[in-house]
Amino acid sequence: MKLTKDSTIYFILLLVPLFWGGAFGSTKHVLSELPPLTASAVRFLLAGLLLGGWLAVRREWDLKVIKDNWLGLTGLGLSGVLAYNYFFAVGLQYTSAITGALVIVINPVTTAIIAVLFLGEKWSLRLGLGIVASLAGVLTVITQGNFASLAGLSLNYGETLLFGAVASWTTYTSLGKVVMRKVKPSLATTVSTLIGAVFLILISLGEGAWYTLPRLSGQVMVELVYLAVFATVLAFILFNVGIKRIGASKASAYINLMPVNAMLIAWAIYGETITLMHLAGMVLVVTGVCLTTLAPAAKETGKTKEGPIELCE
């Protein structure tokens, strides 16, 4: 790949799945003290307030832009923050971990297809091979090479909810590409995060866990800060910049690195064993990302290549 002024984005985007990979361990421990919707509400409320303060310091709040694009921004908050987290968190309570992991695989594929069909991005053999390689790599990591285990999956209530998460994420990503033609990524990120957080708070009240917040352990408080700052604020902004520069399908390919990073972090911090299938899957995923990022760029139709915040882990 010939180095250009945009080449650095390919390296910066590597931080996004790294932050999300670390979020799995943090989230797992947080859920030992908080139910899923309450944990998500706290995370996105903190993130929204941090983003709001950052925009205030930079004097980037633009009420006119918000007013003119309120419908699209509300759509981002409802689809990407509220709906995705609701379907994903609740769905995992009724299904297996392997099915939940498959959501991560399906999301970039559906995004790439929608981007090609409706958003003017080019389809190419290289892009297709990259998607297939990434998909094969993540499946190898998830199943430890036992692809026959996928045949036993059946669609129950949990899987139905997870497919709702896929639809929400695809809607969010596609809508964001349109909204961010008129709204700066930082402003769109802040407003949609706050909107989603408000709705998450309202729904999470039914879990009756907000009164336990003052009694959370120090570790969980630190983990919530990590989830809000690194796995939400920084990751979302970096992903937005990536979509703006290289397009939705290419930036989304980096999501496939998330389970690989989660595996490496589990090995380095929690002492879990990395198998040959883990390594084989890692090679396939990295190959898929490289193929996808080398695919032709979006069509020059006079439209910019902005995109949405990413909510995938």
Image: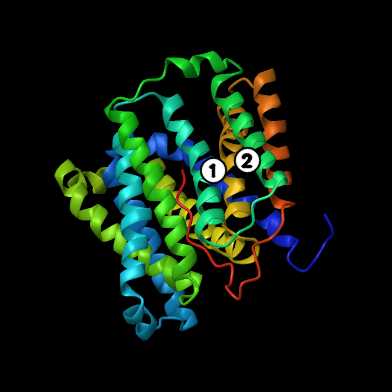
Compared with 118, 84 (above or below) is above
Crowding at mark 1 (Cα within 10 Å: few <14, some 14-19, many 20+) = many
Q: Is the N terminus in the top left, top right, bottom left or bottom right quadrant?
A: bottom right
Q: Which mark, residue 131?
A: 2
Q: Which mark, residue 109?
A: 1
* Cβ atoms under marks 2 and 1 closer than 8 Å: yes
Q: Horizontal and vertical percent for residue 237? A: 53, 63
Work out whether residue 32 can be spotted.
no
Q: Write the residue at 18% across / 41% down.
A: 207
Label 2 – label 1 distance at C-alpha: 7 Å
Label 2 residue SS: helix
Q: Amino acid at mark 1?
A: Val
Q: Out of 71 and 303, give the one closest to the viewer.
A: 303
Q: In the visual, does 32 lie left or right of 284?
A: left
Q: Horizontal and vertical percent for residue 225? A: 43, 52
Q: Out of 27 and 91, give the one closest to the viewer.
A: 91
Q: In the visual, does 226 lie left or right of 30?
A: right
Residue 130 location, quadrant: top right
